[in-house]
Image (cartoon, rainbow, N blue to C red):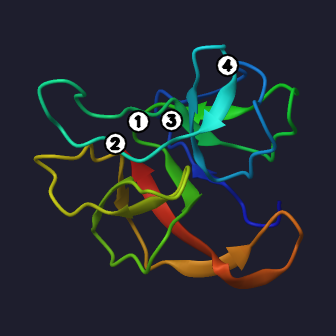
Amino acid sequence: MATEILVNDGGAPARIMNLGAANADIEAGLFVDINSAGKIIACADDAELDADSGHKKALGVLFVDAVSGAPTSIITGRGVVCNVQVTEDIPIGSELTLSGTAGKLEVTADSGQHNVVAIGLAASFVGYGSDGTADATDSWCKVLLV
């Protein structure tokens, strides 16, 4: 992990917690969830609000890379500033939601139908992936968790 994940918790009620073992290898900076077997997974797409599904929630942001079967470190809470992985260019001030790309965020198309999980605090940037190299697929954004 070459991109810093936790920028500042500002004294916010945030915690870094081990909430279970990783179901598979997961990169830092992704939003994670827990499956029915109690394993930590990258979050799936934000389900649109309807009578059956409600909004998709996330446990938090993975603090460091996780190896399959190993404990995880997850940043939880609100008011925390983090660098997270995103799928597209993020304008400053954008409301962000979970995307169709596991664990990454995108600009919220309709906040009435999708769960806003963060606000973009800076324009997105190319960061470094777990392999220590930067490329166009490693897009990051500084966000405030809400």
Q: Which residue is label 2 attached to?
A: 146
Quarter of the image containing the C terminus? Answer: top left
Amino acid bearing label 1: Arg
Amino acid bearing label 3: Gly
Q: Which residue is label 3 attached to?
A: 11
- Position of residue 113 measured from the top left corner of the image (x, y, whole percent): 15, 46
Which label is found at residue 78?
Answer: 1
Q: Is residue 27 left or right of residue 102?
A: right
- Position of residue 134 measured from the top left corner of the image (x, y, whole percent): 77, 82
Q: Which residue is label 4 attached to?
A: 19
Q: Is residue 131 above or below residue 29?
A: below
Element on which disc 3 rests: loop
Which label is found at residue 46?
Answer: none
Foreground pick, 127 / 21: 21
Foreground pick, 83 / 139: 139
Quarter of the image containing the N terminus? Answer: bottom right
- Using the rendered view, name the quadrant where residue 63 is placed: top right
Task: Please state which of the two labelled residues, at mark 3 or mark 2, is closer to the viewer.
Answer: 2
